[in-house]
Amino acid sequence: MRRALILGALTLVLFTAIGDGLQQQWIAVANGPNSGAKLSIEEKRYPLSQLQEDFNQLRKIIEKRHPKIYVDPQELFGLFATQYELLRDQMTELEFYRVLSPLVGSLRCGHTNLVVSKAYEDYLRKNGRFLPVLIRVIDDRAYVLQDLSGQGIPAGAEILMINGQKTADIISALLPNLTADGYNTSKKDYLMNHWFNGLYHYFIDNAAQFTLVYRGTGNEQTVTKTVDGINNQQLPMTTMSIYYPRGNNLYTSAFTEDYALLSIKSFSLRDKKKYRAFIDAFFQEVAVKEISHLILDLRDNWGGSPYYSSYLLSYLISTPTTYFSEPPFYYAKYKKPIQPAEHRFTGRLYVLINGASFSTTGHLCSLLKSHGIGVFIGEESGGSYLCTDASINVTLRHTKLRLHCATTAFATTVSNLPPGRGIEPDYRITPTLQDYLEGTDPQMKLAVQLIDSAR
């Protein structure tokens, strides 16, 4: 009897152990290698079958809906095949994102973007650790604009390496993931300078600590410093957070004895009546004061509705002008000639542009440039007469990556501008490192100098 009891107890222990082992194995299979702890969205992994489904979902949307005006179909087909082969089982969202992003960049469409899931974006806002320096990229070299680490990295220092990788190689790796119309590079330059910290996290290294090798200003000695990443709510999390304007003063004006200044930072506005009243009052004052020089600042204006840009255009033209050549039906009214406004400006116009002068702003600039209205100062605009938009937003089924995909081509009525490029300035002025550090505005400065020389 005693022997039977002992054998029974041993059998119970054995089956319990086996059962516990099977249960633990099942838990490990269900939760992945980090069983026992809840996985963050950054650690969550996806089976190959789900990644393939999401990949094919994105491919189907692009192939069926995107206009693809600047991409060779065979080139795109080959890239889809190449990127598909990079898929593997148990990839994280970020790893999968890095596979898909070059596909979107290859479309050469500034209105088509792929961003991480809402859950990952929210996670980064609370837990993300980013490179703790603000950087400006000039001629493929990276310079410190501001040190956010508190470790005494001097402004103006050149960053030579980050976590063992040369900055020149980092910049080259980032470029294919940035979107722009056609062969334009100024929009990519702008994104690089205003989103470097996020770009580095998404496409290079999502580390929480950074070893920087840099060279201070005025000497050849290099310094190596390891700094912790920072969580900064002011850093943009996605490209879409850059495109949409912030603040209330999206259009402002100023008057001096010699010229008037009109600054419009967005055509993505909501109050048509307020905007019209502002534009009317501005040009009425210009007429009353008999001002003959006007600086129109369209830098950092990502675009918006043609309603606002065409209304501004009516004050700058001298003859009836058609806005769109072949618009979609809902913009049919813009195929009718725009009539010059009563108090239209007849003096000298100076237009400030940069890589973020995009979309509707590019359309406006193309009409001004084509009709010989104004002198353009600054950098090549991010947009011109032809772009694609009427975008749809699609969330991929499993990973929840978000695709913003253009579906329709828009072209203004011009005939003398090259496709796939922005508006070339008459005076190309690119801010130097010293301009950035001192907060000077060389583009505005040149406009004022031209006005002074014309008096």
Image (cartoon, rainbow, N blue to C red):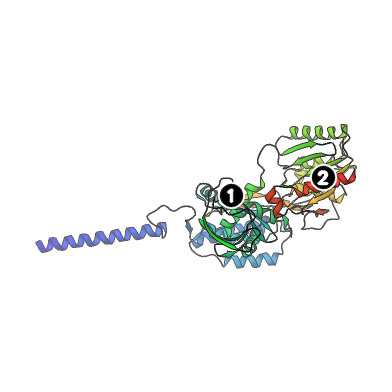
Q: Element under label 2? A: helix
How many numbered tags mark residues here? 2
- CA distance for labels 2 and 1: 36 Å
157, 6: nearer the viewer: 157
Q: Nearer the viewer, mark 2 or mark 1?
A: 2
* Disc 1: CA contacts within 10 A as few (<14), some (14-19) or many (>=20): many
Identity of the residue drawn at 57% across and 65% down: 165
* Above or below: residue 123 compared with residue 224: above
Residue 359's x, y, as percent? 74, 49
Residue 176: quadrant of the picture: bottom right
Task: Tell me the residue at 80%/50% (across/down).
Answer: 377
Pick whichever of labels 2 and 1 is earlier in the sequence.
Answer: 1
Q: Position of residue 102 (x, y in %)?
A: 63, 61
Identified by mark 1, the residue type is Met
- Whether residue 453 is visible here, answered yes or no, is yes
Pointer 2 local density, CA inside 10 Å: few below 14, some 14–19, many at least 20: some
Q: Is residue 335 above or below residue 157?
A: above
Q: Quadrant of the C terminus?
A: top right
Q: Amino acid at mark 2?
A: Val
Question: 370 or 204: nearer the eye?
Answer: 204
Q: Position of residue 341 (x, y in %)?
A: 86, 36
- Give residue 437's mark: none
Q: Which residue was labeled with disc 1?
A: 237
Residue 267: x, y in percent? 73, 42
SS under mark 1: loop
Using the image as rendered, state which of residue 244 and residue 68 is in the foreground.
244
